[in-house]
Amino acid sequence: MLLKQKTTGHFLEVLDVVELTNLCSPSVQARMCYGEELGDPEAFDKLTLCFPSGEELPRCWWDPHYRDQEIETHRPSAGSGVT
């Protein structure tokens, strides 16, 4: 899968899509696609990457707490009698 580095605009070839979608992993192994040769694999912070279109990565790919607020609003209150 190809992604783009936000700061440089260079494309990266992601080596493991499962690692990319693992919300507990803050980085992903990828190779820089710059020039004619692929670079050596290295770790890239997911927050510095986006799709080639410029669209941000889904929050559920990098934030393990992306649903905390939703869960909190559905949690029964202390006086509701629900256990």
Image (spheres, grey):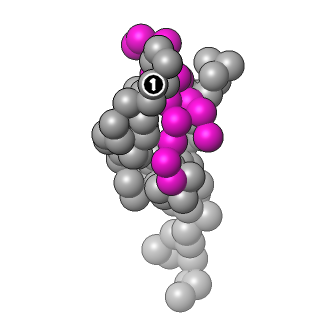
User: Residue shown at 63%/22% (left/top)?
Assistant: 52
User: Residue shown at 44%/30% (left/top)?
Assistant: 38
Hey, which residue is sitting farthest bottom in the picture?
Answer: 83
The answer, for residue 66, to whether it is visible in the render is no
Hey, which residue is sitting farthest front in the picture?
Answer: 36
Query: Considering depth in this image, is 38 or 43 the residue closer to the camera?
Result: 38
Where's residue 41, x and y in %? 35, 41
Where's residue 59, x and y in %? 55, 42
Query: Considering depth in this image, is 64 or 36 the residue closer to the camera?
Result: 36
User: Residue shown at 51%/53% (left/top)?
Assistant: 16
What range is drawn magenta here? 1-16
Residue 25: say if magenta: no
Q: Which residue is identified by label 1? A: 37
Q: Is residue 44 left or right of residue 67?
A: left
Where's residue 1, x and y in %? 61, 40
Residue 19 sits above or below residue 39 on the image: below
Hey, which residue is sitting farthest top in the picture?
Answer: 8
The answer, for residue 53, to whether it is visible in the render is yes
Q: Is residue 26 left or right of residue 13?
A: left
How many numbered discs sit on the rendered protein?
1
- For label 1, the SS is loop
Query: Considering depth in this image, is 61 or 52 the residue closer to the camera?
Result: 52
Mark 1: few/some/many CA within 10 Å (<14, 14-19, 20+) = few
Residue 3: say if magenta: yes
Residue 63 sits above or below residue 53 on the image: below
Instruction: Please state which amino acid type lies under the numbered disc 1.
Output: Glu
Residue 45 sits above or below residue 75 on the image: above
User: Residue shown at 47%/14% (left/top)?
Assistant: 35
